Amino acid sequence: MLNPRPAVLRIKEYHPPLGGRVGMRLDFNENTSGPSPRVRERLALMTPDDLARYPEREPTEHCLARFLKLGVEQVLLTNGVDEAIHLLCQAYVDPDDEVLIPVPTFSMYEIYAGAAGATTVTVQSDASLRFPADKVLQAITPRTRLIAIASPNNPTGACASEEELLKIAAAAPQAALLVDEAYYDFCGHTMLGQIGRVDNLFVARSTQGRNYQGLGFTTGEERRTMCTGQNTATNFNRTNGARIATVNAGFTIQNLTADNFAFNLKQNITHRNFINIAIKR
């Protein structure tokens, strides 16, 4: 019988809901109101031909670069942060390397590290659930090749300071430091200002269900360190085609109104408070 690679067999099983989903799952961080009206208008104009073609990544990367005030060579569009994590592991992690992960956190870091054959080294947060910066520094070894940090963290909400992250990057120059800012909008602190200054820094944002509705992207020093974009990032991914086409028109990112984002954020906070009250009952 044909078996997968041993590294794949050792991966912890992950069982997301694949069908029968009725209503909204809180653990998926889904947008409670959908995309902005302007995005819906743009989607309504799309033709069957638009959906049939492979989406072009480059125009969207130019749009993102302008919005983020980065060079286009520093931006790589991915199908969610999941694909960005996968590409980083493909580009930088070999079997028997170590991937350092503060826990509890997003499960896909460990899954993709395991698929690459790496040894996952977890750093447990204490009872306060604050970011364990000192423990992370102590866990770095010459074998460390990737450090994955969600800031703000899912599920604890803990944020790592810029000073802490810079210390970690400096302590592990042989490792890629991924700062996953999927929940950036809920804290406002970002490491994007260090792109181009810190060679081993990568910043990821996931926009699915939050404000831009349906993109992921990673930023790094330049494309050769950005998972060598042309070599490891697929140009044939249809999954996010409609969403990418929306941004290609310059609509979703640069013309997103502050009012719409403020409405979504207010709604999220309102629903969170409602849930807290219901739990206390």
Image (tube, grey):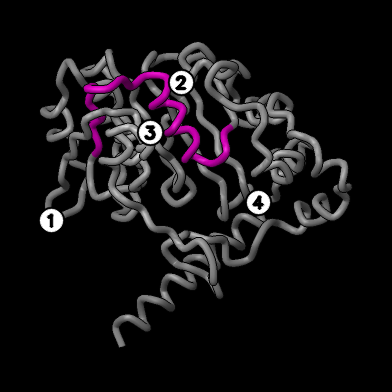
Kindly identify which residue carries mark 1: 127
| Tag 1 and tag 3, C-beta contact below 8 Å | no
Task: Indicate the amino acid at tag 4.
Answer: Ala
Instruction: Please identify the residue farthest to the bottom as the structure is shown.
Output: 281
**SS at badge 2:** loop
Cα–Cα gap, marks 4 and 1: 37 Å
- Residue at horizontal 36 percent and vertical 53 percent from the top: 14
Please tell me whether residue 118 belongs to the stretch shown in magenta.
no
Please indicate, yes or no, whether residue 185 appears anywhere in the rendered image. yes
Q: Which numbered tag is attached to residue 195? A: 2
For residue 210, above or below residue 167: below
Residue 262 sits in quarter: bottom right
* Nearest to N terminus: mark 1 or mark 3: 1
Judge left or right: residue 194 versus residue 6: right
| Tag 3 and tag 2, C-beta contact below 8 Å | no
* Nearest to N terminus: mark 1 or mark 2: 1
- Residue at horizontal 23 percent and vertical 46 percent from the top: 103
Task: Indicate the amino acid at tag 1.
Answer: Ala
Q: Which residues are magenta?
A: 78-101
Q: Which is closer to the viewer, label 2 or label 4?
A: 2
Q: Position of residue 188 (x, y in %)?
A: 45, 44
Residue 6 sits in quarter: top left
Task: Indicate the amino acid at tag 2.
Answer: Ile
Kindly identify which residue carries mark 3: 179
Kindly identify which residue carries mark 4: 258
* Nearest to N terminus: mark 3 or mark 2: 3
Q: Position of residue 107 (x, y in %)?
A: 33, 47
Q: Which is closer to the viewer, label 4 or label 3?
A: 3
**SS at badge 1:** loop
Task: Indicate the amino acid at tag 3.
Answer: Val
Q: Which is closer to the viewer, label 4 or label 1?
A: 1
Cα–Cα gap, marks 1 and 3: 23 Å
